[in-house]
Amino acid sequence: MPIELPPGTAAYSENTPPPSNRQLLTLLALFVMGIGIAIALTFWLAGALVWFIPTSVEQQLGRAMVPIYEAQAQPSATQNTLNQLLDRLEAHLPTEQRTGRDYQVLYVPDATVNALAIPGDRIIIHQGLLAEVVSENELMMVLGHELGHFANRDHLRALSRQVLLQLSLSGIVGDFGSIGAIATTSISALANAQFSQQQEQQADRIGLTLLNQTYGHAAGATDFFDRLSQEERPGLAILATHPPSQKRVRNLERLIKQQGYQVGEKTHLPPSLMP
Ligand SMILES: [Zn+2]
């Protein structure tokens, strides 16, 4: 027969005292901490995974992705000139970042103001970005910045953790079966990727070094982002994918001073890149 408890009496005995509020709070704190640690670990793992993706797998992904961009790109005098400029920067890359690489610009004639690095050693430059550029030097800084993203493997970091895991595993088991599907999801991931301030500053640092080595001075390094961030045009794709901010500009100015770089005369854009 069930024991009737008087109203308001809790269903426990003297032998199992109720957990105190303090104990409950401790448990809750441990639980929240555990979740926090798990999230931090996942992010760390995703960041570390990119270094385990072999170049061969990256290029395999590139072979699936590049044709999709090539279909929108326009082989033209403009694209050729952009590639000649890129070659000049590439000549100053450390050997380990050049070996087995074939960096090329794909010029996409649409109004998007953006540039991005994609697997397959390609840098996408949209016409909209070119239209905003004033000097050859600032264009070279944009190209150098994108080469910096390759050096840090940011073009892979932008992909989802699931894709990174698949890619690093396919490096081990040699299974490229799903690469087509990965390419499709990667394209939208890259178009919407938002790099961290730290990733941007690292890419800036590499871009600045290449710029200085190419011209013997660092003029034009800050022009492009300085101008765009001051114009307050929040809709610009490049400002969404590459967080702007005066902080970045100031960081570049500080680096220029620190490295003792000269600031010389800027070079005009080559005629084939003029609007
Ligand atoms: Zn960037």
Image (cartoon, rainbow, N blue to C red):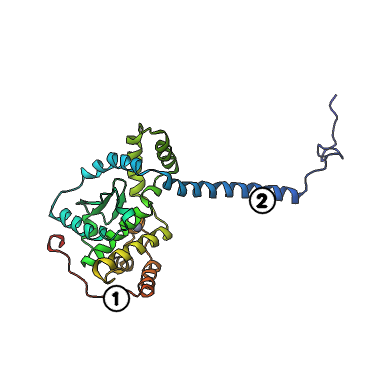
Q: Position of residue 64 (x, y in %)?
A: 29, 39
The residue mark sitting in front, 2 or 1, is 1
Against 250, residue 70 (above or below) is: above
Residue 4 found in image quarter: top right
Q: 25 or 96, which is in the foreground?
A: 96
Q: Residues within 10 Å of mark 1 (few under 14, many from 20)?
A: some
Against 175, residue 56 (above or below) is: below
Q: Position of residue 219 (x, y in %)?
A: 27, 72
Q: Residues within 10 Å of mark 2 (few under 14, many from 20)?
A: few
Is mark 2 in CB contact (under 8 Å) with mark 1?
no
The residue at 42%/57% (across/down) is 196
Q: Position of residue 74 (x, y in %)?
A: 16, 48
- Judged from the image, the secondary structure of the residue bearing numbered disc 1 is loop
**Amino acid type, residue under disc 2 in the picture:** Ala
**Amino acid type, residue under disc 1 in the picture:** Gln
Q: Which residue is mark 1?
A: 262
The residue at 42%/48% (across/down) is 51
From the image, which quarter does the C terminus lie in? bottom left
State the mark number for residue 29.
2
